[in-house]
Structure formats: structure tokens, C-alpha cells
Image: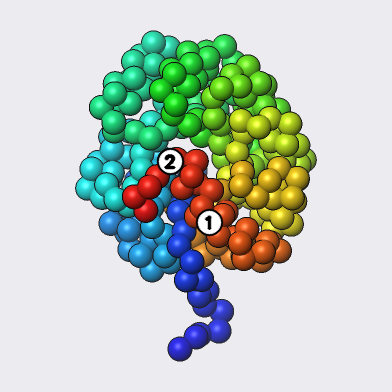
Amino acid sequence: MHQPGRYIPSDSPKIDAHAHVGAFGSWCGVSVGAEEMCEIMARLGVKRTIISHPDNRTTLEAQRRRPDQFAALAWLNPADGETAVHKLVELAEAKQIQGLKLHPLFNAFVADDECVFPLVEAAQKRDLPIFVHSGHPPFSLPWSIGQLAERFPAARFVMVHMGHGHGVYIQAAIETARRRENIWLENSGMPMPGKILEACRRVGSERLFWGSDAPFHRHEAEMLRTEVSGLAPSELEKVFYGNIKAFMGWRDI
């Protein structure tokens, strides 16, 4: 029986384009284990989740234990130079990852700094998508991500959080993706439902992904924000499921 105030997810399948497993300490103070994440996914109809963590061992272990539920990104710091590139190549050749995660804010580098180029080149060569955190000055602003995408037009970039919590950066994310066809937008942690609708109209309904950013945000809140954005049912199916499935080239889900 429906309980007032309790979120009831739709029956349509979902893929979470951006989340994390493990613990994040310091000011964050949040964590979620792999098994707990799988329980949440089962309850809410999430078929697969793309995960990352600063300690790649945490990500890889979760994927090893639940290969059908998790897809791993390699979280690498461009400041580590050739060490980071070698790690990306090693993980890619072992087929342990399905993409690269760059976090300019966490690792303190500007998104289009020259130190980033070798990692992007290595990812591009192996057709690995590149997920880039956005929305925090001075490191991870949409304009810098756009300049990186312009420099590497054959690479595929996902602007995670599509500008995050600042209206100016959210608008910049939409405008940047509109100009750069090799940028896709992911909407977790972005608080404005109307901007989800605007992104679909101006950038294209096939270039937006739904994500939870768990454990920093709740799946239910992120789902509801997308559901009330004004998208048509066919567009919701794309954002929740079809777009990221096609982007990742998944046929087994």
C-alpha cells in the first residue's frame, strides 16, 4: 500500500550513469558498500551502475564481486604523469574498466591543463569514455571541459553533474554541450528540474544521462527530479536507460 511521502519508482528500467561505492571521509562523511548499493538498485529497478572511487581497488573489487551490476571507471590523477597513463593502459588491456574518471576538484587540476592530455589521448586511443566532474571553481568549470573537448574532438566526454549546483555553471554546461557534439551531460546533483528539460530540448534528448551520485545524494531524490522535469515518457526512457546503454555499447542489459 502506498504510504504518503514515500517515493514509488516507475517500473521502467534504469542505468545509473554516475555513482560511487566505498567511503568518503573528511567533510563528506558518507559511504555505501557494494552489497548495500545492490540492494538499493534492486529496490528501485536500477539494472547497472557505473562506479568510481579514488582508490581504484575499491571499485575493482565491487565490480569483481558483482560484474553484472557494476561497471568500473578508473579514477586517475593526471598529475601522476606516466604512472597514471600506464595504470589506465594496464586496466584497459585487462578489460577491468569501461572508462576514465577525472575529478579536477578532488585532485586539484584545471580540466584542460596540459597534464590532462596524455590520459585523454590514451583513453581516446582505446575508445574509453571520459567522465569529468563539473561545477566547482577554479578547477572543474564547464568552459574548461569544453576547451578540453575541443582539443580532442574524437574523444567522448561526459560532463558529470552538468554544472552541479550553480545556475551560471548549469547554463554553461548546456551551452557548452550544445556547441560540442562530443560532450554528453549527466544530471546527478543538479537541483533544477527545468534545466533537465532545457538540456533535452537544446542539446538533444539522446545526450543526457541520469545518475545518482550515491552516496553523496539519494537515488530517490535524483529520480524524482528527473521524473518531474517535464520530459515525455519516451524521453524519460532515454535519459534513465537507453542513452547510457547505447553510449557504453552494452548489449547484455
Sooner in the amino-acid sequence: mark 1 or mark 2: 1
- Whole-percent x, y for residue 222 in the image: 56, 59
Q: Label 2 neighbourhood size at 10 Å, few (<14), some (14-19), many (20+)?
A: few
Q: Which mark is residue 240?
A: 1
> Amino acid under label 2?
Gly
Towards the viewer: 231 or 41: 231
Which residue bears the numbered disc 2?
Answer: 249
Q: Label 1 neighbourhood size at 10 Å, few (<14), some (14-19), many (20+)?
A: many
State the residue at coordinates (43%, 40%): 249
- Whole-percent x, y for residue 231 in the image: 68, 61
Q: In the figure, residue 40 lies in which quadrant?
A: bottom left
The single residue placed furthest to the bottom in the displayed view is 1
Q: Secondary structure at mark 2?
A: loop
Front tag of 1 and 2:
2
State the residue at coordinates (71%, 42%): 203
Q: Secondary structure at mark 1?
A: helix
Contact flag, marks 1 and 2 (Cβ < 8 Å): no
- Residue 54 makes an appearance in the image: no
Give the Cα separation between the discs numbered 1 and 2: 15 Å
Work out whether 173 lies above or below 123: below
Towards the viewer: 235 or 173: 235
Towards the viewer: 200 or 134: 200
Query: Is 49 left or right of 211, judged from the image as shown?
Result: left
The single residue placed furthest to the left in the displayed view is 65
Work out whether 183 lies above or below 83: below
- Whole-percent x, y for residue 166 in the image: 72, 44
Q: Quadrant of the N terminus?
A: bottom left
Q: How is the image coloured?
A: rainbow
> Amino acid under label 1?
Phe
The single residue placed furthest to the front in the displayed view is 251
